Amino acid sequence: MAEIKCEIFKLPKITDYRGNITFIEGQRHIPFMIKRVYYLYDVPGGEARGGHAHRQLEQFIISASGSFDVITHDGSEQTRFHLNRPYYGLYIPSMTWRELENFSSGSVCLVLASEYFDQADYIRDFDEFVEEARPGRTRV
């Protein structure tokens, strides 16, 4: 089975002199149906968000305004993505550690999620995540 990785997707952008529009359709522009939407804003300078992984939930992260960095870790490799355009988004598969930092003033981070909120789906300890993400480990 091919390993699913984090990936930047370009979204439709309709340009108009009155202002541009971008839209997102689940299972068409992103690889899952959207069950939850939330957004982060008014993040104070120097603060970070995230710092967890999900066992089942997939996410699609967009910089609706401003910019920020998303640092992902798959259990063995770390990658940094800089998001700064509302027509690009970062797909994050399940079992991927994520941290968000370097928020510009006035930035808005829009997150589309494949599942409803479930506290049991979160892994909040990095060492526990690495152990669960280890190749060949059977997941319950």
Image (spheres, rainbow, N blue to C red):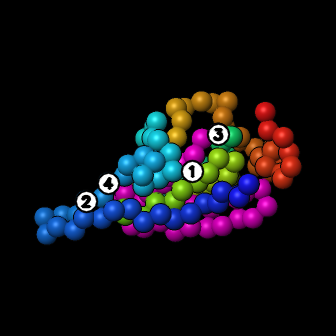
Q: Reply yes or no: does residue 83 show up in magenta.
A: yes
Q: Which residue is mark 3?
A: 56
Q: Nearer the viewer, residue 66 or 34?
A: 34
Label 2 to label 1: alpha-carbon separation = 27 Å
Q: Are marks 3 and 1 in contact (CB under 8 Å)?
A: no
Q: Are marks 4 and 2 in contact (CB under 8 Å)?
A: yes
Q: Reply yes or no: does residue 61 show up in magenta.
A: yes
Q: Which residue is mark 1?
A: 49
Judged from the image, the secondary structure of the residue bearing numbered disc 4 is: loop
Q: Name the side, left or right, on which 126 lies relative to 21.
A: right
Q: Which residue is mark 4?
A: 23
Question: In the image, residue 16 lies at what x, y percent?
Answer: 17, 67
Amino acid at pointer 2: Ile
**Image depth: mark 2 or mark 1 in front:** 2
Residue 48 figure quarter: bottom right
Mark before the other along the chain sequence, 2 or 1: 2
Q: Which residue is mark 2?
A: 21
Mark before the other along the chain sequence, 3 or 2: 2
Label 3 to label 1: alpha-carbon separation = 20 Å
Judged from the image, the secondary structure of the residue bearing numbered disc 3 is: loop
Dot 3 crowding, Cα within 10 Å, few <14, some 14–19, many 20+? some
Tell me where the magenta segment starts and ends, as one range: 56-85
